[in-house]
């Protein structure tokens, strides 16, 4: 292809259109004879005001992306309540009552007390590991290893949040004195938080906002994602048993119905959402006083890999395969476009496509599986349109196994060369389609980033310190994280996770999240003997949960 781009690249007679759904990957699906029984979780209940309520209204079926061989009917693995505006308002009212304008039991507790509640919850949660991992595999088809990592990373995140809060509290155990005024500054809760996580990390990403919101003293309405929600149902009885009434309320149903209804009350003080910018904008607009609404948003991304002419191609290929195809590319931090210097394009693409086509496709619990069925019903059709658009405008499918689909399986598809006239050049594909473009001058990549509506992360591959330094100094003003000779990723959770432009608003890390869900509050007085004695008595008698000198053991 295009000999001027560094030489000839053989295409191996690859089909240049995505094939219509066939039984191409029939052997990758489940056999009846395997004797594996799908789970079934009848989620006809919801949690509000400390009560798990039975739901007698309409429910939605949860289907697995896994099919039995020879069958076109999806496997039903559960149901969930399609709650209405009425139930959404009930959840907000319960959360509002629990906070009670800061007068509720939960916001007035000391951090030490709230930490103990979270620890007790964590004990119950750990006992659900096997059940939650199994539901993740069946509902979103995340591999067993990755499902286990998602659960374990969530547990670690909660434990690290507790440690971070203890450290923060210890630093706040002081009185500051300036210009004749003495005071103590601490962080206090905002009020009612509305939290909603995504389908691709339905457990971990939800908890990265839920736990900081709770532990800082807010009450919460948690909206479950449409896809990936079953893993939360085993936790409802733990929430109900551990936390005070109304502190945590869990709703499900259409986001278009439930979330705007919550917002329209004007009672939501914080909105934490991981999803699309379009959805985030629509939900925020429903708030009658948006200037009062604090938001923390994790949105779309189009993270590029930039492969310089002197890059170690073995490292670049390994990291770009991981970055673009881990969990089928269904990560906001995934590499979603690759820019490779024209002088090494042919060599890189040859190595890259060879590795891609050797990735094993199959079911999430099978050994060494890398590509699994896609959980979003509409995604195979969307990817098909992206591929056809690119091919019609000059791109080619350059890997022999690319461009094939079978029900929920879509084979990894490498497109080259892509250009600005193609949708896949601009849109976040969120699936196993990898567009590759070449550059001669690095300004071409800079211009792409400047024009992009996204700005989350970028990966740079090369050896020359001078070139890498220049890239770093420019890219940090375009994206929030630059990864050198490594794929884009969120972790570790102590690092800031944020973005520019349409990719994020606010920062999530263990430390930052505590600040997102709280506000600095101050108790101050004029410095004189009477006031000093007054403050001393309050602290020594522990009459106030805010004004105190109480140290936490951080280990």
Image (spheres, helix red, strand yellow):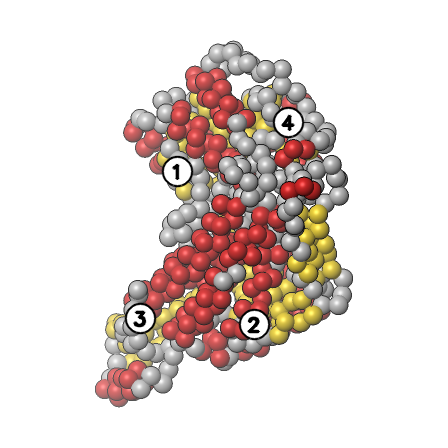
Q: Where is residue 355 in the image (x, y as percent from the top left)?
A: 49, 26
Which residue in the protein does label 2 denote? 240
Q: Earlier in the sequence, mark 1 or mark 2?
A: 2
Q: Relative to 110, is 250 on the left or the right? A: right
**349 is higher (above) or lower (below) than 58:** above
User: Residue drawn at (29%, 81%), measured in percent from left and top?
Assistant: 526
Q: Closest to the observer: 156 or 211?
A: 156
Distance from disc 3 to disc 1, alpha carbons, whole Å, reads: 35 Å
User: Residue drawn at (68%, 33%), measured in percent from left and top?
Assistant: 26
Mark toward the viewer: 1 or 2:
2
Q: Residues within 10 Å of mark 1 (few under 14, many from 20)?
A: some
**108 is higher (above) or lower (below) than 231:** below
Which residue in the protein does label 1 denote? 483
Picture quadrant of residue 132:
bottom right
Distance from disc 4 to disc 2, alpha carbons, whole Å, reads: 47 Å
The answer to whether residue 136 of the structure is visible from this angle is: yes
Q: Which of marks 3 and 2 is nearer the N terminus?
A: 2
User: Residue drawn at (46%, 32%), measured in percent from left and top?
Assistant: 320
Q: Which of marks 3 and 1 is nearer the N terminus?
A: 1
Q: How crowded is mark 4: few (under 14 residues within 10 Å), some or many (20 or more)?
A: many
Picture quadrant of residue 248:
bottom right
Q: Relative to 515, is 243 on the left or the right? A: right
Distance from disc 3 to disc 2, alpha carbons, whole Å, reads: 27 Å
Which residue in the protein does label 3 denote? 552
Q: Are marks 4 and 2 in contact (CB under 8 Å)?
A: no
* Number of the label disc, if any, that sits on residue 403: 4
Distance from disc 1 to disc 2, alpha carbons, whole Å, reads: 42 Å
Q: Position of residue 238 (x, y in %)?
A: 54, 68
Q: Closest to the observer: 388 or 146?
A: 146
SS state under label 1: strand
């Amino acid at each position: 292809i295009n000999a001027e781009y560094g030489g000839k690249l053989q295409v191996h007679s690859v089909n240049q259109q995505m094939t219509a759904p066939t039984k191409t990957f029939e052997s990758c699906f489940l056999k009846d004879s395997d004797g594996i029984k799908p789970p079934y979780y009848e989620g006809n209940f919801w949690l509000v005001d400390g009560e798990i309520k039975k739901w007698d209204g309409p429910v939605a079926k949860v289907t697995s992306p896994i099919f039995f061989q020879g069958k076109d009917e999806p496997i039903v693995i559960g149901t969930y309540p399609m709650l209405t505006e009425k139930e959404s308002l009930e959840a907000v009212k319960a959360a509002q009552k629990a906070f009670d304008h800061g007068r509720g039991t939960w916001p007035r507790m000391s951090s030490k007390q709230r930490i103990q509640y979270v620890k007790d919850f964590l004990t119950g949660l750990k006992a659900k590991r096997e059940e939650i991992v199994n539901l993740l595999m069946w509902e979103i088809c995340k591999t067993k290893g990755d499902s286990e990592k998602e659960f374990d990373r969530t547990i670690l995140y909660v434990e690290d949040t507790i440690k971070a809060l203890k450290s923060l509290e210890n630093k706040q155990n002081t009185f500051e004195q300036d210009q004749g005024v003495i005071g103590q500054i601490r962080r206090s809760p905002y009020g009612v938080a509305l939290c909603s996580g995504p389908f691709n990390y339905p457990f971990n990403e939800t908890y990265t906002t839920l736990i900081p919101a709770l532990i800082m003293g807010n009450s919460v309405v948690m909206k479950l994602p449409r896809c990936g929600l079953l893993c939360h149902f085993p936790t409802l009885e733990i929430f109900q048993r551990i936390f005070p009434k109304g502190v945590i309320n869990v709703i499900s149903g259409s986001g278009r119905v439930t979330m705007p209804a919550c917002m329209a009350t004007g009672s939501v003080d914080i909105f934490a959402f991981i999803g699309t910018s379009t959805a985030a904008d629509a939900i925020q607009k429903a708030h009658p006083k948006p200037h009062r609404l604090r938001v923390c948003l994790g949105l779309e991304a189009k993270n590029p890999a930039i492969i310089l002419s002197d890059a170690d191609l073995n490292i670049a290929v390994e990291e770009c395969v991981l970055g673009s195809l881990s969990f089928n590319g269904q990560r906001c931090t995934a590499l979603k476009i690759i820019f490779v210097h024209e002088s090494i394009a042919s060599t890189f693409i040859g190595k890259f496509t060879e590795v891609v086509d050797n990735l094993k496709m199959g079911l999430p619990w099978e050994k060494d599986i890398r590509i699994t069925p896609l959980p979003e019903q509409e995604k195979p059709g969307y990817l098909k349109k992206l591929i056809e658009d690119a091919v019609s405008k000059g791109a080619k499918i350059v890997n022999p196994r690319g461009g094939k689909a079978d029900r929920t399986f879509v084979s990894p598809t490498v497109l080259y060369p892509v250009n600005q006239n193609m949708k896949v050049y601009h849109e976040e594909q969120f699936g196993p389609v990898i567009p590759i473009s070449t550059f001669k001058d690095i300004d071409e990549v800079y211009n792409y980033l400047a024009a992009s509506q996204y700005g989350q992360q970028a990966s740079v591959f090369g050896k020359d310190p001078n070139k890498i330094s220049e890239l770093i100094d420019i890219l940090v003003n375009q994206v929030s994280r630059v990864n050198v000779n490594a794929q884009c990723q969120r972790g570790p959770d102590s690092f800031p996770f944020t973005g520019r432009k349409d990719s994020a608003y606010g920062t999530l890390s263990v430390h930052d999240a505590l600040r997102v869900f709280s506000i600095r509050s101050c108790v101050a007085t004029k410095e004189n003997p009477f006031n000093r004695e007054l403050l001393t008595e309050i602290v020594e008698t522990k009459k106030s949960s805010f004004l105190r000198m109480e140290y936490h053991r951080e280990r």
